Image: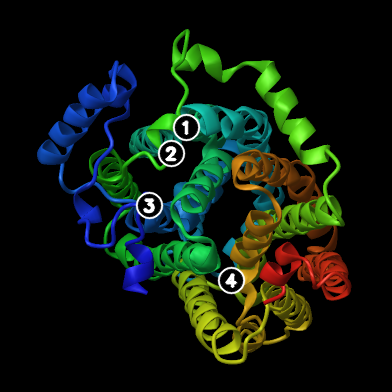
Amino acid sequence: MASENNERLFNSLPENENEDEIVINNDATSLGANNDNALSLLESAVSIKPHKLFILEPAVFLVFLAFNLSGAVFQNILLYQTCVYVYKYNNSDCQPLLGVERESREVQHIETEIQPYVAKILMAISLLESIIPAIVSLFIGPWSDKYGRRPILLTTFSGYLIGRIIATILIFISTKIIISPWLFLLCSIPSVLSGGTCALITGIYCYISDVAKAKSRALRMVLNEASLCAGMMIGNVLTGYIYEATNAITVFSISSILLLLALLYVYVYVVESLKPEQIVIAVNSKAREFFRFDLVKDLVKTCIKRRPNYDRIIIWLTMMALTLALFVMAGDDNVSYLFVRNRFEWTLKDYTVFNATRIIAQIVGSIIGMYFLRKVLKFSIVGMTLISLASCVLESTVRATAVYWWELYLGLSLGLMRGIMGPMSRAILSHVAPANEVGKIYALTTSLESLSPLMSSPLYTIVYNVTLSYYPGMFNFLSAGLYLLCYTFIATIYGIQKSMGGSATYQAIGS
């Protein structure tokens, strides 16, 4: 595993070359008038900066650790602020809504009253974090294909950091005066303008596709998913304890520090993944080149053009499966915490322990999937994707029918393989699409994924609010049905692969 993580971009170098010491100074090499000047500048860069890497996993870990350290706390803050600002309850009545202590019957009644209002705020945040990033993503892929992946990563990490600092300031102000819960929408604006999760995912997977060899690309994507899940797990475990021992300001301050460390890691250690000859010298500023609509036009043409055999339909079925899976996850995330609070009377700590257990199960499932099912039993990439989606269907069904809290944990064992769905699906795209088109296809995929909450958040919010009084877990049946549709898409690809197995492309996704 360590050897796979330390792959380097320039595989044409002699095997005895110390690749860990290679650094490309793109600005310097673009100025070189001849090979000698370029070589001297390259040697200078090597001697000055010997520790640049092509490994993003530590930064991904820190970002998702920061997200999950403060995510559930944020929802508690919204519940409390809505209680005191909108519904005008006394501070003592609203205090249990912060999630540190278990609620009385009276407080449960208050929460049932205010949850639909909070669900609308969360829906608005979800929509804000979907519309603009979806548009930005259409420019990100083509732009990064020409000017590099690193600027996208730096901009996205900076946006997250600024947003978390704004959230910390608002929480501090709310301890002094009562403020509207709608003001917390301001926290999302910096990350939204920098592309948000849409830009982050596009940048990460384009980067991995650049630096990973074809035979290890699926593994690298799973390792990235594992670092993401590890950050989520540790964040979910720590948040309840830190929040109980301190307060929301401390939690968000720690989250901000983690995001700062992630940004510094990318700035200091992560090198541009494109080769110098692949990067275009901008006639105007790179920022002005970003919003060129001919880049989007080229992206659309790339994704809809005719391809050999069934490549185009495979690409679109995979993109639809990824989009629909994120549709379900976004909808679930919007109401899951409210669901377990209402149905099982869970505190924040109960919820975070459950989420941590769920993430551990995903990591274990990824390990079993990659090193037992795939390496030992030789399951194909498509076959692994089908197993993952079957796990999603089973887990959602168990959650929908759960009567006791322990049944949610039972569902985790059935959803063991759900974590490899995304990496395996993106591995299919990277094998079917040519290397110079992967960035554009990833960009359109993440744009569609980002748009999915536009429909999933309102849909899940409506379903949850309508069924809250008699069956609050009804939304899980919706999730199971949509995951089953994703399974059908990938099963179609499996059938195509079996019928066209002689092609090198289909051998790659079927082996």
Distance in Å between CA atoms under marks 3 and 4? 34 Å
Give the amino acid type for the residue marked by disc 1 in the picture: Gln
**Badge 2: how crowded within 10 Å, few (<14), some, or many (20+)?**
many
Of the image marks 3 and 4, the number of the one nearer the N terminus: 3
195 or 255: nearer the viewer: 195
- Which residue sits at x=77%, y=76%? 393
Place of residue 361 in the rendered image (x, y in percent of width and height, measured from the top left): 52, 81
Count every numbered label the image shows and give the total. 4
Q: Nearer the viewer, residue 67 or 445?
A: 445
Q: Secondary structure at mark 1?
A: helix
Q: Is residue 40 left or right of residue 486?
A: left
Mark 2 and mark 4: Cα distance apart in space: 28 Å
Residue 12's disc number:
3
Q: Amino acid at mark 3?
A: Ser
Q: Answer above or below: position of 223 versus 362.
A: above
Horizontally, residue 354 falls left or right of residue 119, namely left
- The residue under label 1 is 278
